[in-house]
Image (tube, rainbow, N blue to C red):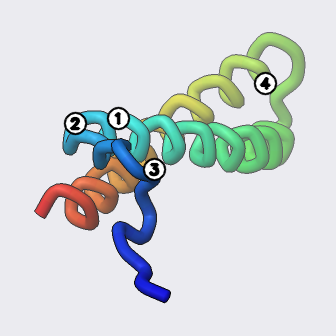
Amino acid sequence: MPVGNIGHAQGQQKPSCWSTIKMGFGMGFAVGMGAGVIFGTFGGLRMGLRGRELIGTIGKTMVQSGGTFGTFMSIGMGMRNCV
């Protein structure tokens, strides 16, 4: 039995390079924000922060780790699918 065109259904196109990079950034940002919640909470509690200071620290850590991990994930997805 012949097997052809594995991974794509009949008539479907491969996603563009830009959409692959955007998808990689989105996935990396989501994972990084999850890690930022954990590390920001533990770090803030260790420093003795409470209330608004703790929430601000958690938010800042979430955005920083999300941006960092999203950047690296988008680079990896671009190298994997666009080169």
Is residue 44 placed above or below 31 in the rendered structure?
above
The residue indicated by pointer 3 is 69
Q: With 51 as the anchor, is 53 left or right in this view?
A: left
Local crowd size for mark 1, using a 10 Å CA cut-off: few (<14), some (14–19), many (≥20): some
Residue underneath mark 4:
54
Which residue is denoted by mark 1 in the rendering? 22
Find numbered disc 2 in the image and state the secondary structure of the residue it sits on. helix
Kind of residue at badge 4: Leu
55 to the left or right of 26: right
56, 50: nearer the viewer: 56
In the rendered image, the vertical position of residue 23 relative to residue 74, given as above or below: above
Q: Type of residue at label 3?
A: Phe
What residue do we see at 45% from left, 50% from top? 69
Label 1 amino acid? Lys
Residue 21 horizontal/vertical position (percent):
30, 43
Front label number (2 vs 3): 2
Q: Residue at x 40, y 40 (%)?
A: 25
Residue at (88%, 23%) from the top-left corner?
Answer: 50
Furthest residue toward top: 52
* C-alpha gap between disc 1 and disc 4: 31 Å
Q: Nearer the viewer, residue 47 or 52?
A: 52
Q: Are marks 2 and 1 in contact (CB under 8 Å)?
A: yes
Which circle's residue, 2 or 4, is located before the other in the chain? 2
Q: Which residue is mark 2?
A: 18
